[in-house]
Image (tube, rainbow, N blue to C red):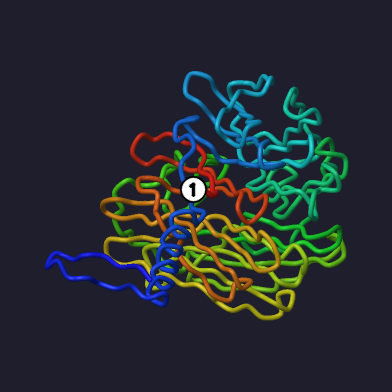
Amino acid sequence: ILKRRNRENKTEVFSPASMRVLAVLLGLVAAANAAPFWRILNGSLATDIIGIGFTSKEVGYVSGDANGVGPIILKTTNGGVDWTPCEATFGPDILLLDLDAADDTIVVGSVFGELYSDDAGKTFKESYGGGMSQSIRYIGKDGSGGKKFAATGTFNFQKTQGCAISTDGGKVFKSYKADLFTEARYGVFPNDQTWYIAAGQWPDQTDATVAPKRRSVFQDDNGRFPLHFKPQKLSADGYMAQITKTTDGGATFQTVFAENGTFYFNGIDCNPTNADQCCAVGEASGTAESGARIHCTTDGGKSWNRTFWMPEVSNEGYSLMEIRWVNATDVWAVGGELKSIAPSAWFIQSTDGGKTWAHSIKPIFGYYALGLSVIDPTHMYAAVDDLITQMSGVAKYEEL
């Protein structure tokens, strides 16, 4: 029993039960302060960062562009604290796009085709057979030791909408037509046979060959999100959303989701232990169906449920660009809350396999999150844009 004197000089007695309650409350406060959250590691690594891929808690890569330098690929070996340019030379006209990495292999997309490194970023060489890819993913859980990668976009001189597969670490790609009525944007490749392609477009979309950095209806042709959001007025007829799937390694594709006049798809990902359980993020602006959404399936695409929806309002737009499963239950989606003032990076989490979603605490004001790489439930990295300085950097999810 604890006793103390109060201001009236009277003795107050604290019973063991009340002390236990106090201990629990203090424990909850300490746990909240120690809980993992997203924070900016470096907000000004480059002018643009589009691709991000980590192979471990410590080693990771980003691809983008820096004023005065040109295209760059940066590498960290201490969990994103310090970054150094990879020892590679790119032509000044090369625009680097998305990136992924597994073991010592890095594959990066560009406006003139894919590039690869098989020596942890020391050298990069041109791939053969690829094209202009919006997204790069390794195949399966680890890319078969850095050998198997997939690119999603347009191939064969803009004639093929779909994906391209490499089984030799990015040296050679073979393209596959994904039976789409709109543009291939993102893909996920759970194993050698099962692939999903998320596709779509928006009403005033600029041709990708003219503005390859524009990956969202909210961006301008230079790939910049607005610091001060203003509602758009767009025709709903221009929105298209589609997901196609193959279960025979690209020999045939079938449409498992199709919807026009409402939104378009961005990133897609699947449960690493179940290729039939997947979620895809989408967005729209300027119409009655404007907002950010997440659609999920548990039966391989036979049915889809919209499990997350945040509608656009007069002075606030909501965007989701990428999504990643961490394990069988933990899923993260990233994007931005675009407002007239104080926009912020958006991190949406599900802990029940995509059934329900919650916003991450402690928003990162002034930023937008557009790329995501996950290692485990407490080590994740996001490519972010600083909407104020017009620079790009990396955020990290970790415990203090």
Q: Nearer the viewer, residue 128 or 62?
A: 62
Q: Quadrant of the N terminus?
A: bottom left
Q: Residue 145: horizontal and vertical position, in percent?
A: 85, 44
Residue matched to label 1: 206
Estimate how packed mark 1 is, as few (under 14), some (14 to 19) or many (20 or more) residues with alpha carbons within 10 Å. some
Residue at 62%, 60% (x, y): give it.
Answer: 199
Which element carries disc 1, helix, strand or loop?
loop
Q: Nearer the viewer, residue 153 or 319?
A: 319
Question: On screen, 140 above or below 330?
Answer: above
Q: Amino acid at mark 1?
A: Thr
Q: Nearer the viewer, residue 32 or 99?
A: 32
Residue at 59%, 26% (x, y): give it.
Answer: 72
Q: Residue 27: horizontal and vertical position, in percent?
A: 46, 63
Q: Nearer the viewer, residue 203 or 356?
A: 356
Q: Residue 269: horizontal and vertical position, in percent?
A: 67, 61
* 18 left or right, relative to 323: left
